Amino acid sequence: MINNAMTLEEAIQQRRSVRGYKPDPIDQETLDSIFTSAQLSPSNCNVQPWQVLLATGEACQILKDKMHHAFMHGQNMNPDFSGLPKFEGNMRTRQVECAQALYGAMGIARDDKIARMKATARNYQFFDAPHVAFITMKKDFSPAIAVDVGMYAQTLMLLMTSHGIGSCAQASTAYYPDIVREFFELDNDMGILFGISFGYEDKTVDANQTRTTRAPLSQIIHHKK
């Protein structure tokens, strides 16, 4: 059901990465409403360059099983787009603080490699989410087009939040793009940017107690008057 009382600012403030879900599926009417509204996202010349691969129910479970098996058996990762850079300075500090907050919430010590491995593997089970949406675009599109796709993804997740639905954008789900392409019978010229796991939050999951901070405006805004 749509939470009509939630403002845009409230949705922005409440949205966060949810890493544990209830099995309850989202009804089709709500899904249609969310994805229809997300189509209003801006894009260069209104080309709407995104393509979304949506898996629900049995289809979602099959993809979980395939990806989790690939990860646990050490299958080579071959993402369609370049991976994360090596962060330095303030960005590296934020990255470390984020990891500390997440593993701290789960009670996993820094030197507990087995527990960290199990936590990482949860990515490939979509944190038990009943739905996953893979966000794609053509492989030969430039980073400028990826910006359009990113705006679509942000709009989509904020809409989910406004409906009381949790989500988590996962770069890790793009590490095995061939699994996704084969499952959806997608043309090879389409690249997998990332996946978004989503559903109703299970608040009993320790990882969902994670809270991160944001940098002060003095580090972000360079303002001349």
Image (spheres, grey):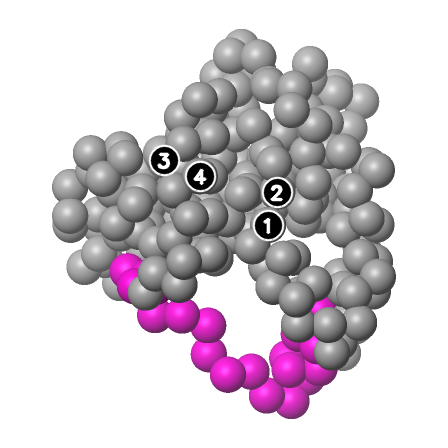
Q: Taking 93 as reference, is 1 above or below it?
A: above
Front disc: 4 or 2: 4
Front disc: 1 or 3: 1
Label 1: how many residues lie within 10 Å, few (<14), some (14-19) or many (20+)?
some
Which residue corresponds to mark 3? 52
What secondary structure is found at the residue carrying circle 4? helix
Q: Amino acid at mark 2?
A: Phe
What secondary structure is found at the residue carrying circle 3? strand
**What is the x, y in percent for residue 185?**
20, 34
- Marks 4,2: beta carbons within 8 A: no
Label 4 vs label 2: CA separation?
12 Å
First-in-chain label (1 vs 3): 3
Looking at the rendered structure, which numbered label has been put on residue 127?
2
**Residue sitting at x 44%, y 22%:** 58
Is residue 80 one of those drawn in magenta? yes
**Residue sitting at x 76%, y 51%:** 207
Label 4 vs label 1: CA separation?
11 Å
Label 1 vs label 2: CA separation?
5 Å
Label 3: how many residues lie within 10 Å, few (<14), some (14-19) or many (20+)?
some
Which residue corresponds to mark 4? 65
**What is the x, y in percent for residue 71?**
44, 56
Label 2 vs label 3: CA separation?
20 Å
**Total marks drawn?**
4
Which residue corresponds to mark 1? 122
Looking at the rendered structure, which numbered label has been put on residue 169?
none
Report whether 134 appears left or right of 5.
left
What secondary structure is found at the residue carrying circle 2? helix
Tell me where the magenta segment starts and ends, as one range.
77-99
Is residue 9 one of those drawn in magenta? no
